[in-house]
Image (spheres, grey):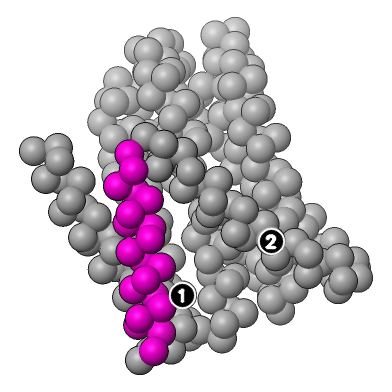
Amino acid sequence: MRSLNQIKRGFKVGLPIMLAYFPIAVTYGVLASQAGLSVFELTGMSLLVYGGASQMMAINMILLHASAIEIVIATFVLNFRHFIMSFSFAHRTMATPLKWRVASTLFITDETFSVTTVEKDAAKQTNGHLFYFTFVFVSYLSWVVGSFIGGFVGDIIPDSISQSFSIALYAMFIALLVPSVKNNFRYGLIALLAMILNFGFGQFFQEGWSIVLSTLVASGLGFLVLRRRVL
């Protein structure tokens, strides 16, 4: 009974994330289909990568005809924060079984990580690991299913409509940036620096490599600036 209650609570907590992920995933699926990926390929990316911002960036780089290595490096850099969040989650849930901790970390995202910080007491509850796993996994399923539907729909809707979905790429990055800038204006300066560097590197390198280099340099300088502020 306690196990079922934890699963129900996990689903209830995960429902808002599911509802938020689904339309974005559908949009990603349409854009990926427009970029030339098959339904199998774009759904596979959601299954294995599971990073909205990085997947959107990868689709944009595909449209720019970037090489595979450029896309892999850029995606790795953008998703590196997932390592930090996963380690933090695993550390805070030491009271839960190891296999469930490992399984849950595979589905950690920015949104689900935020929930785990609020629901940190669940780690001390009986079968609390089921609560964590349920809401991170249903969020993951929402993203994967939405991607599949978007890819399927992208193959049948007119190009004039599917092309209008491309604005979602910029809207998503703005939505990610604005809250961070509100908390610390330095994030805005880092984003501006990345834009300037991308333009500068674009004069000497292919567009894919300019994105990779500007991301690495801006992130490195941003880390030093923010680290100095903390110290």
* Residue 45 located left or right of residue 77: right
Task: Residue 181: give x, y in percent of width and height.
Answer: 40, 42
Residue 170 versus residue 85: which sits nearer the camera?
170
* Lower position in the chain sequence, tag 2 or tag 1: 1
Relative to 138, is 208 above or below?
below
Crowding around mark 2 (Cα neighbors within 10 Å: few <14, some 14 to 19, many 20+) is few
Residue occupying image coordinates x 49% and y 34%:
112
Instruction: Give the magenta range.
Output: 184-203
Task: Residue 131: give x, y in percent of width and height.
Answer: 51, 22
Quadrant (top left, top right, bottom left, bottom right) of the C terminus: top left
Q: Nearer the viewer, mark 2 or mark 1?
A: 2
Residue occupying image coordinates x 60% and y 38%:
139
Instruction: Name the residue tied to disc 1.
Output: 71
- Measured in 3D between alpha carbons, the distance from the residue under mark 2 to the one under mark 1, in whole angstroms, is 20 Å
Can residue 195 be found in the magenta stretch?
A: yes
Q: Quadrant of residue 138?
A: top right
